[in-house]
Structures are given as structure tokens and as C-alpha cells.
Image (tube, grey):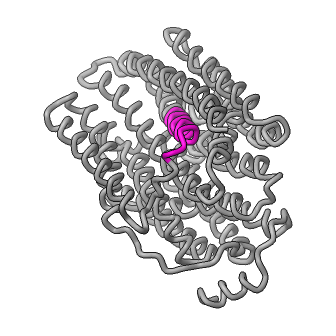
């Protein structure tokens, strides 16, 4: 259907918010694609030792299959407001599936590391469309009184996947090799394509906005410099070259902010940052995403390299915690009934408890202890993550919530990418020149656990400030 016909249809019959079968199916379809994509973020973590050996690359290089993917994902998400205004949701969904399947095929057939990395980047393009599309459907089409619940359901999909990934990757890799990790999820993407093509509906009119190419380049340079700088720091420390890379990041991001304020069609509407409570909530989501992906990388690799666990055992250590991530809809329902304070406070408390346990018991960790400690993390994530996003969006005027959703999703993925790079840098620095890899990994792992605990402590404080600032705003 052309832009004109879509707009005429919406003008004649304005979209009515109702939670019917088609809406649920469209959320499930976009969510299934997002789930498949996010599973790969962590499924490959279990295979990293095998990939390093097969492609003859080191720790700092191999982590790019996750960081590069997340980098492309975070940059693509910033374009979603433009894409949503320019193309129908159905077309965007079809494009997302196409990019995802092409990228997955490249990964499965990769004869060398650069091809595997290219496949991950192409996957990132598809996921960068699919994730914000799913949340956009919830924000634009779900009845207001059920938004908290459905945001919880949508968040559950993307929150569950990082924990399922290592278990899935470990089992499939031991049975059939790492290439089958990609192939086995392709049927789910095909099914989601069929359901989405039939059920995804249009709720907002289309226009022809101008694409902010300069803003896109500045943002991409800023994000890439951040991840690349962390990666290089793990190799050479705080050298002049590394400091120069971080300087480029600062210049690019400042230039982007100045440009976006003057642009008529910015990739990110900078007005959202004039709401302090929202900004604090964004900081929380980025930091918790940092910890989620940091743990998803650290736990299976620590178990294999420091505790001599098998790939299948190390891959299942996050699984019980992932089951408790299913509390996301419960947190959303509590928010709908009594407000955001209760589920967020409980969630942040459990996240902090988990991180403290990892730090305190680091010298005597066993695979069973790691599994038990991560249960608290999964419960905290389930109760506090999506409710923080919902609370942050509620701090914005309704006309800015789509832009706010884009910012949340962008910085969630960027936070995850930084988390993987930072944890890799800490562990990799301890492994450099080590003769005892198990002892070096344990020492680096302890430093990484301390880092993750500090990150969650800052997130808890930021959430506290979000509530204080929101009260003052009212």
C-alpha cells in the first residue's frame, strides 16, 4: 500500500487502541525475531574459545563478533524514527527479517573471521530495525491502561534471550558445532516473517522526512570510537593512541549533539534530554544492559577457563536466572496497579545482592555458586528493567515518547556493547603474558565482578534520582 493510501485510510478510520489477536500476534512476531537475534549476542560467548582457535585470533579480536554486532545495532536504532515516518511497519518488518536471514547465512557459512564479522554486522542491521519496531507497536497501539503489562512482555522477550543464549549455544555447539548455532534458529525467523507479514498493522501516518546523514556519520564515529578505544586499551593500556581515540569520540558526540539541536530532522530528538528524570532512567537502562551482557560474556568463559567446566555446563549456568527474568510482566502489572517505585526498588535490590555475592565469594567460586548467585540477578532484571523503561517514558510528554523509546533502545544496546568490551578488556589484561591461564582468568574475573558491582550501584543511585526528580517535576 502506498504512503498516500495508508494516510487516507488512517484519516478515514483512525487507529483504535485495542488488545486484540492481531496486535498480540504482531508483538510476538517482532519479538520472536528480536529474540532470535539477541540469543546470538550471548550464544556465541560459549563458543569463543573454539572460535579463537579455529580462526587464530586473540580475545580482544574475537569479542568484535559481539561488540561489532551491538555497535551496528545501536547505530541502526537511532534511524528508526526516520524509518518509521518514511516506511510502513510491515515493510520495515520484512526488511528486518531479510537482513537477519542474510546475516545469519553469512555467519553459518563463514570460511574466515572477516566473513563471520560481516555476517554479524548485517544481522545487527536487521535487529536494529526489529527491536524498536516491537517496542513502537506497544507504545503506539496498546491501550494505555495495559502499557505496563505489555512493555513487560516485550522486555521479557529481549531480556530472556541473553540468558537463554549461552545454554542454547553450549548444547548445540557440543552436539553439532558452532555453525549450527546459527542454522537452528533460522526456522523461527521464517515463522515470525509469515506471522508479521499478515498481522503487523499501521497506526501512524507516513511522511517523507529528510535523512540526517551528517548526524548518522557523527553518531557512528562516536559510538565506534568508544568501543574501539576500550578494545585498544585492553591491548596497550592508556597510550596516547587510545587517548586520541577517546578524544575523537568526545568530539564526534559533542558535534552530534550540537548538530541535532539545529537540525530540522535529527536522528535523536534532543528535547528528551531536557527531562532529568528520563535521563536518569536512561542511565539506569544503559548500565543494567552493561551488566547483563557483561555477565553473559564473563560467566560462561570464567567457568570454562578458570573452573575447567565444559561448554554445555558453562552455557547452562545462566539458565535458572533467565527463568526469573519472566517476572518482567509481573513487574509491569505491579507498576500498572501501585506505581513504579515498588518493582524498581525490589529489582535494583536483587541486582545489587547478586553482584555483591559474586565479589565476596570470588576466591571460592564454583559453577553451582555462580548459577545460584545469578538467580538473584535474573529476578532483579525481571522486576526492575522494563519497569524502569516504562517509568522513564512516563516522565516524558506523550509526543516525545517515541523518541524516548528510541533513546532507550539505542543506549541499551550501546551499554551492552560497552559492557562486553569492558569486561573483555579487564579479563584480557589479566591474561596477557600469563603462563597459568586459569589463575589469570580468575584474577581478571574478580576485577570484572568488582566493575559490574560498581556499575549496578551507580544504576541504583540513578534510579533513586529519577524518582526524586520526577516528584519535583510534578
Residue shown at 62%/73% (left/top)? 89
Q: In the picture shown, does residue 15 fall above or below 438?
A: below
Q: In the picture shown, does residue 375 fall above or below 69?
A: above
- Judge left or right: residue 225 versus residue 427: left
Q: Is residue 311 magenta?
A: no
The x and y percentages for residue 316 are 63, 34
Q: Which quarter of the image is occupied by the C terminus?
A: top right
The one nearer the camera, 43 or 307, is 43
The x and y percentages for residue 368 are 64, 20
Residue shown at 83%/35% (left/top)? 338
Q: Residue furthest left?
A: 240
The one nearer the camera, 347 or 218, is 218
Question: Residue 219 is drawn in which quadrant?
Answer: bottom left
Q: Is residue 286 magenta?
A: yes
Q: Which quarter of the image is occupied by the N terminus?
A: bottom right
Residue shown at 61%/89% (left/top)? 4
Q: In the picture shown, does residue 214 fall above or below 52?
A: below
> Is there any visible trace of residue 289 in the rendered image?
no
Total numbered circles: 0
> Is there any visible trace of residue 422 in the rendered image?
yes
Residue shown at 16%/31% (left/top)? 239
The x and y percentages for residue 210 are 42, 75
The one nearer the camera, 85 or 327, is 85
Instruction: Characterize the magenta stretch by its predominant secondary structure.
Output: helix
The x and y percentages for residue 362 are 51, 13
- Judge left or right: residue 351 versus residue 304: right
Magenta residues span 273-291
Amino acid at each position: 500500500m502506498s504512503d498516500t493510501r495508508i494516510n487516507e485510510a488512517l484519516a478515514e478510520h483512525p487507529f483504535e487502541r485495542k488488545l486484540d489477536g492481531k496486535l498480540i500476534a504482531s508483538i510476538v512476531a517482532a519479538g520472536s525475531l528480536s529474540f532470535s537475534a539477541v540469543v546470538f549476542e550471548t550464544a556465541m560467548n560459549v563458543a569463543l574459545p573454539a572460535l579463537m582457535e579455529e580462526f587464530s585470533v586473540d580475545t580482544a579480536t574475537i569479542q568484535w563478533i559481539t561488540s561489532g554486532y551491538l555497535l551496528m545495532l545501536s547505530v541502526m536504532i537511532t534511524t528508526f524514527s526516520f524509518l518509521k515516518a518514511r516506511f510502513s511497519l510491515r515493510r520495515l518488518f520484512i526488511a528486518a527479517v531479510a537482513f537477519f536471514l542474510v546475516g545469519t547465512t553469512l555467519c553459518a557459512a563463514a570460511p574466515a573471521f572477516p566473513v563471520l564479522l560481516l555476517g554479524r554486522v548485517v544481522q545487527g542491521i536487521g535487529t536494529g530495525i526489529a527491536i524498536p519496531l516491537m517496542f513502537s507497536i506497544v507504545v503506539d497501539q496498546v491501550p494505555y491502561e495495559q502499557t505496563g503489562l505489555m512493555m513487560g512482555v516485550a522486555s521479557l522477550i529481549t531480556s530472556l534471550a541473553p540468558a537463554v543464549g549461552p545454554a542454547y549455544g553450549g548444547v548445540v555447539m557440543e552436539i553439532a558445532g558452532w555453525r549450527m548455532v546459527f542454522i537452528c534458529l533460522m526456522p523461527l525467523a521464517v515463522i515470525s516473517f509469515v506471522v508479521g507479514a499478515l498481522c503487523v498493522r499501521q497506526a501512524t501516518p507516513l511522511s517523507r522526512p529528510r535523512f540526517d546523514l551528517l548526524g548518522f556519520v557523527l553518531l557512528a564515529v562516536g559510538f565506534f570510537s568508544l568501543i574501539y578505544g576500550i578494545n585498544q586499551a585492553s591491548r596497550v593500556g592508556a597510550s596516547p593512541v587510545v587517548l586520541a581515540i577517546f578524544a575523537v569520540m568526545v568530539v564526534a558526540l559533542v558535534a552530534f549533539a550540537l548538530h541535532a539541536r539545529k537540525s530540522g530532522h535529527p536522528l535523536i530528538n534532543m528535547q528528551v534530554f531536557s527531562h532529568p528524570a528520563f535521563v536518569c532512567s536512561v542511565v539506569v537502562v544503559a548500565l543494567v544492559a552493561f551488566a547483563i551482557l557483561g555477565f553473559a560474556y564473563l560467566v560462561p568463559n570464567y567457568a570454562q577457563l578458570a573452573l575447567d567446566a565444559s561448554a554445555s555446563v558453562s552455557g547452562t549456568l545462566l539458565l535458572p536466572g533467565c527463568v526469573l527474568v519472566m517476572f518482567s510482566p509481573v513487574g509491569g502489572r505491579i507498576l500498572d496497579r501501585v506505581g513504579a517505585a515498588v518493582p524498581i526498588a525490589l529489582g535494583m535490590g536483587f541486582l545489587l545482592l547478586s553482584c555483591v555475592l559474586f565479589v565476596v565469594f570470588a576466591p571460592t567460586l564454583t559453577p553451582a555458586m555462580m548459577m545460584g548467585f545469578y538467580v538473584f540477578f535474573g529476578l532483579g532484571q525481571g522486576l526492575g528493567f522494563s519497569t524502569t523503561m516504562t517509568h522513564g517514558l512516563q516522565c516524558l510528554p506523550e509526543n516525545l515518547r517515541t523518541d524516548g523509546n528510541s533513546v532507550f533502545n539505542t543506549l541499551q544496546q550501546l551499554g551492552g556493547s560497552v559492557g562486553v568490551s569492558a569486561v573483555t578488556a579487564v579479563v584480557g589484561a589479566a591474561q596477557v603474558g600469563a603462563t597459568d591461564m586459569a589463575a589469570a582468568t580468575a584474577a581478571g574475573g574478580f576485577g570484572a565482578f568488582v566493575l559490574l558491582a560498581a556499575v549496578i550501584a551507580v544504576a541504583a543511585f540513578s534510579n533513586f534520582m529519577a524518582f526524586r526528580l520526577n516528584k519535583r517535576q510534578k
